[in-house]
Image: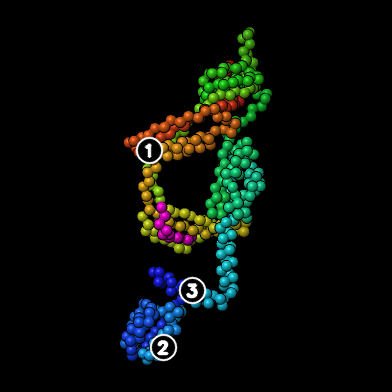
């Protein structure tokens, strides 16, 4: 294999030798350290062989000595390939331009898709993303996804979670809006109720009848400040309750991590398939019969910008199958605990409201020997505003 690569790199020729003393010709080449390979007899008086270009000229005196004739059949290898390409300057220029365009297109954002919007205007989000470089025509490696996600949360009170995912030439922006209770007109009687369960920390009533006190445990939907006020003479009237109620809230998350995991190590063997997607129709350009026992599949999409082709968008879909070997790795109990703790905290932090103040964090660890895994329970105590307005139900209140 190494010799073949060496000869291809420096070039070789395929020759035909004709004459009455072919055996003598071959013996002399061996004695003079001239390497011939893939030698086979064509007929009684001729053979074919391959020889590197450095040794080709040395065959002339041997042929003369053995009264044989050497014919050049074909030239192979990189030197001859480059020589042929030199004559085709436009082909070289076109190939270079193609490679440059392919590199640019694979690193340029061709489309930005925003999902999850309900009340927010998509144009406003697109404008904000464009300010941070998330727009068509920009290089995707210039995008700091974590920074832009945080900026979207800071600039938009109605967004509770945002994620930016770059897939090929597409940028997928996923947004989850906060569930904000509708504002009730100040002239409409209402209660202040608990948005979630917790323990009351502080109450600042502005209008209405306070129904709970600090230290009370409240459930979700329980009335905190009532809009129904009873006077001493048993008369009642209704008001638009107002006030702030903060409570201590406990958030819990449990994560299980096995102490043994299987790592997928690539072997270097790949199989690639190509498909062309025109609108909803998929055309198989090159299919693959996958024989790998274990493999990872990645899909790359090269998209022609929709501004150019609106009715029939075209995608080149490249499916890469990479063979992997599965290796059993022992993580260790402590490492698994730390990993589980990190995952649990990250999940809880995503669920917390932006105005939540963290008071305490606690962890409960447990090793399940029968299942070969560790379990971590994370408990985060926060201080949050839990009062929300709810219109009075006059039938139940009176």
Pointer 3 with pointer 2, Cβ within 8 A:
no
Residue tagged 1: 373
Instruction: Give the x, y percent position of residue 201.
Output: 57, 21
Q: Residue at x 60, y 51 (%)?
A: 142
Tag 1, which secondary structure?
A: strand
* Distance from Cα at disc 3 to Cα at disc 2: 27 Å
Residue 206, quarter of the rendered image: top right
* Distance from Cα at disc 2 to Cα at disc 1: 77 Å
Residue tagged 2: 61
Residue closest to the eye, 1 or 289: 1
Residue tagged 3: 78
User: Is 252 left or right of 394, judged from the image as shown?
Assistant: left
On residue 343, the disc is none
**Which mark is first along the chain, 2 or 3?**
2
Residue 182, quarter of the rendered image: top right
Instruction: Give the x, y percent position of residue 8.
Output: 44, 73
- The residue lying furthest to the right in this view is 187
Pointer 2 with pointer 1, Cβ within 8 A:
no
Q: Residue at x 43, y 80 (%)?
A: 55
Residue closest to the eye, 120 or 36: 36
């Amino acid at each position: 294999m190494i010799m073949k690569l060496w000869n291809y790199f420096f070039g070789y020729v395929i020759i035909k030798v004709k004459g009455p003393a072919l055996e003598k010709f071959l013996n002399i080449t061996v004695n003079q350290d001239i390497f011939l390979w893939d030698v086979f007899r064509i007929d009684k008086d001729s053979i074919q062989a391959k020889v590197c270009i450095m040794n080709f000229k040395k065959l002339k005196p041997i042929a003369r000595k053995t009264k044989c004739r050497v014919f050049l059949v074909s030239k192979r290898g990189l030197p001859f390939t480059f020589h042929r390409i030199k004559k085709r300057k436009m082909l070289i220029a076109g190939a270079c331009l193609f490679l440059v365009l392919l590199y640019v297109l694979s690193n340029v954002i061709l489309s930005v898709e925003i999902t999850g919007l309900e009340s927010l205007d998509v144009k406003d989000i697109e404008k904000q993303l464009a300010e941070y470089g998330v727009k068509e025509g920009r290089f995707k490696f210039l995008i700091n996804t974590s920074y832009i996600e945080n900026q979207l949360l800071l600039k938009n009170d109605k967004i509770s979670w945002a994620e930016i995912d770059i897939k090929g030439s597409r940028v997928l922006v996923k947004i989850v809006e906060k569930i904000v209770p509708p504002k009730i007109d100040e002239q409409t009687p209402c209660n202040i109720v608990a948005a979630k369960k917790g323990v009351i920390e502080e109450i600042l009533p502005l209008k209405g009848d306070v129904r709970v006190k600090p230290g009370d445990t409240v459930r979700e939907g329980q009335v905190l400040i009532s809009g129904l006020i009873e006077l001493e003479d048993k008369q009642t009237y209704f008001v638009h309750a107002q006030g702030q109620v903060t409570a201590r809230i406990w958030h819990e998350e449990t994560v299980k991590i096995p102490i043994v995991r299987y790592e997928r190590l690539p072997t270097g063997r790949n199989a690639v398939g190509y498909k062309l997607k025109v609108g909803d129709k998929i055309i198989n350009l090159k299919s693959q019969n996958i024989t790998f026992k274990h493999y990872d599949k990645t899909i790359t999409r090269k998209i022609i910008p929709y501004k150019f082709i609106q009715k029939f968008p075209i995608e080149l879909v490249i499916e890469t199958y990479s063979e992997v070997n599965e290796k059993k790795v022992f993580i260790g109990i402590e490492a698994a605990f730390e990993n589980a703790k990190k995952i649990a905290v990250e999940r809880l932090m995503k669920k917390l409201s932006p105005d939540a103040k963290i008071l305490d964090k606690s962890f409960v660890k447990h090793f399940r020997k029968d299942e070969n895994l560790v379990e971590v329970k994370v408990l985060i105590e926060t201080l949050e505003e839990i009062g929300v307005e709810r219109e009075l139900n006059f039938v139940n209140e009176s």
